[in-house]
Amino acid sequence: MKRVAFIMAAFAASSTTHACSVCIAHALGAALHGFGAQTLHPGHGVIGLSHLIFSKSNETDEGEGPAKEFEIFNQTSIEAAYGITGSLMGTASVPFVHKSIRVSDEPSESVSGLGDVALGLTYQLPVVEKNPVVTAIGFEVKLPTGANNRSDEEGNRLDEHLQPGTGSTDFALGVLFTMEDEHQRGNLWYGGLRYRWNEENSHGYKYGNVLFYNLGYSFQTGKTGSMAVELVGRLAGKDSDTGIDDENTGGHLIYGSLSTSQTIGRNLGLTASFLVPVMSHLNGVQVERPVFQIALSSRF
């Protein structure tokens, strides 16, 4: 398989797929999905710059009774992958976030800053001759590098969902696969299944644990381009605040995704991805909207 070319295209779209049921907690570190089971050759790497935007709304009980909360989330990330050995690849994502939340008709509040850095390893299992499926195991840790104690002008701590980081160290483990289409050489099936454990932060808030899954098909468009169609699912538990569940968080959501990638020169790749909710069974009152990302990547 032409794994470097495939990974460049997939890497550029690697963090598009998991807009959180409330905020950033489930959005970061989605690289386990876009890659499939491909790894880079030893000493080879990919670095990318991406920008992601999505919005959502949900009911909240903060303030004097139920109200609607509207959120717009922007994330610009520096991401990298590096082939450590022929079967082991390291990944890293450094996000910078801008979050804006408005509750009902009140003025909106916004914060910006460094988000939570994610580090990962992908181990490709030994390839079996004549077996068209390549399989890998992925592990990721998300570190509490983003601020989780921002305050307003009066010194009151901002809403949990406005904080740049979650304040917790979280872990994910998954299995991934890639399979070349035997009828169309160069075209690939890819997918994965990943579970993420979110820990409670020092303020007693815990984002619900979440199961991610995806299935995609990547095909060539001309000599230097490719496209991918994909289904991306997220099954999240409810968030909890000091042990009390938030009834307007978590649930099951499936996105339909379309991505297009174009190689620019020898080492640059440009990718744009658009995800639309196609099935939504969310808890309480929540509305998830489309996700858009554009990314530039370069191999070295």
Image: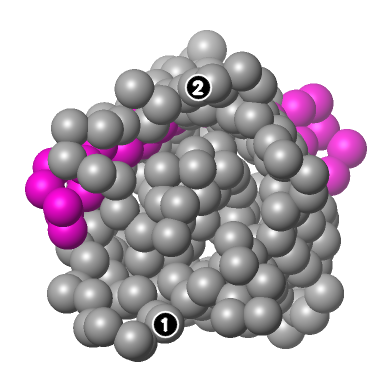
According to the image, label 2 marks what residue? Answer: 267
Compared across the picture, whether 86 is left or right of 281 comes to left
Res. 257 image quadrant: bottom right
Q: Secondary structure at mark 2?
A: loop
Which residue lies most toward the top here? 153
Quarter holding the N terminus is: bottom left
Marker disc for residue 61? none
Name the spot of residue 27 as percent of width and height, x first: 51, 51
What percent of the width, then of the height, locates residue 211?
44, 77
Left or right of residue 21, residue 149 in this image:
left
Residue 229: image location, x then y, percent: 74, 65
Q: Amino acid at mark 2?
A: Asn
Mark 1 residue element: loop
Q: Which residues are magenta?
A: 79-108
On the rendered image, what quadrant is the C terminus found in? top left
Q: Which residue is mark 1?
A: 132
The residue nearer to you, when weighing 181 against 135, is: 181
